[in-house]
Image (cartoon, rainbow, N blue to C red):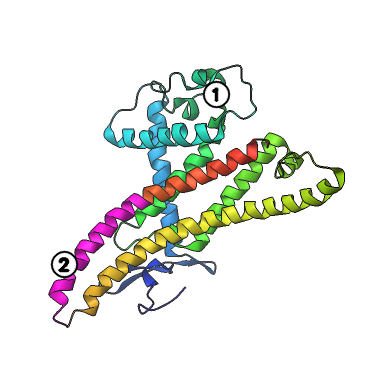
Amino acid sequence: MAAGNDDPFHHVRDFPHFDLPRDVHLNLPSIGGFEITKYMVLQVVAFGLAYLIFRGLAKRVANGEPVRGRWWNFWEMLAIFIRDEVVRPTIGTGHHDHAHSESDHFAGDEAEPIRSVVAMPHAQTGAHPADKYLPFVWSCFFYVLFCNLLGAFPWLGSATAEINVTGALALTAFGAVVFYGSRELGPAGFWKNLVPGMDLPGGLKMVLVPMIWLIEFLGLLIKHGVLAVRLFANIMAGHTVIAVILGFIAMTAHSGFFYLVMPASVLGQVAIGMLELFVAFLQAYIFAFLTTLFIGAAVHPH
């Protein structure tokens, strides 16, 4: 962690305090020598928001009645979007029982938005086979979304602008991919599945298969590393651009350009802020979509 406001990335770094107006630092406690930081607190806040919102939503769908109210409909809409536009079409039916057609799986979606996953067993609802991966993908999407959105509030920040946070998220996604793939194909089957079946002569196969397996294994690690870097870079870049634009005001405070730069910087900050709001949703979607894509590749045999 860097100290001092002369650091151009000061506002996107993690600190053991919150910076408040008039140079006030709200120091965070150290518990048993373990230092509590700002991003740790904001991650707990993101978790708390997700828990409170979706606990309330689950209660409203548990009785089988449609959800009412714009607030609850908004979150239900996002959950349904991730289910119907990301998880189900990306993962598909796997090699489960195909006795039911695709239309059977999706029948009644309008009348039964998320009750099949939240409130009722799959056997009672005929839920899509991919729905068993929904809790993890939903958790990824909404947790990343709330972490991103907290950066829009003054004096807070986005925990996803810290590479250690996004790295931990990517590591969790990697663990889920290995777990779901091993559960579906078996531990040996999952790692064997990294190499597609190839009809090759014996000697050539002995050379190529280990080489391709190593390449695919490294690719699996790299893909999850990129998952961390992509989220971190996009969120950090947005906050950095806002700080740079606002910094123009301080740079021209004692010059004749102040009255020209100040309104332009404020308008630029507002425009970038609106773009950041869009990026907060977009990056949460991309993280959830790529995680779903990796899970889908893991649970389907080549």
Q: Is residue 70 magenta?
A: no
- Dot 1 falls on a residue whose secondary structure is helix
Kindly identify which numbered label has been placed on residue 190: none
Q: Is residue 242 left or right of residue 131?
A: left
Name the quadrant of the C terminus: top right
| Residue nearest the viewer, comparing 202 with 111 | 202
Q: Is residue 114 left or right of residue 260?
A: right
Circles 2 and 1: CB atoms closer than 8 Å: no
Q: Is residue 154 above or below residue 202?
A: below
Span of residues in magenta? 255-279
- Tag 1: amino acid: His
Regarding residue 5, the answer to whether it shows in the image is yes
Q: Is residue 31 above or below residue 248?
A: above
- The x and y percentages for residue 274 are 27, 54
The residue to which callout 2 is attached is: 263
- The x and y percentages for residue 218 are 67, 55
The residue to which callout 1 is attached is: 122
- The x and y percentages for residue 199 are 78, 38
Residue visible at 55% across and 53% down?
170
- Dot 2 falls on a residue whose secondary structure is helix
Q: Earlier in the sequence, mark 2 or mark 1?
A: 1
Please tell me whether the stretch drawn in magenta is mainly helix, strand or loop: helix
Closer mark to the observer between disc 2 and disc 1: 2
Graded by Cα atoms within 10 Å as few (under 14), some (14 to 19) or many (20 or more), the crowding at tag 1 reads some
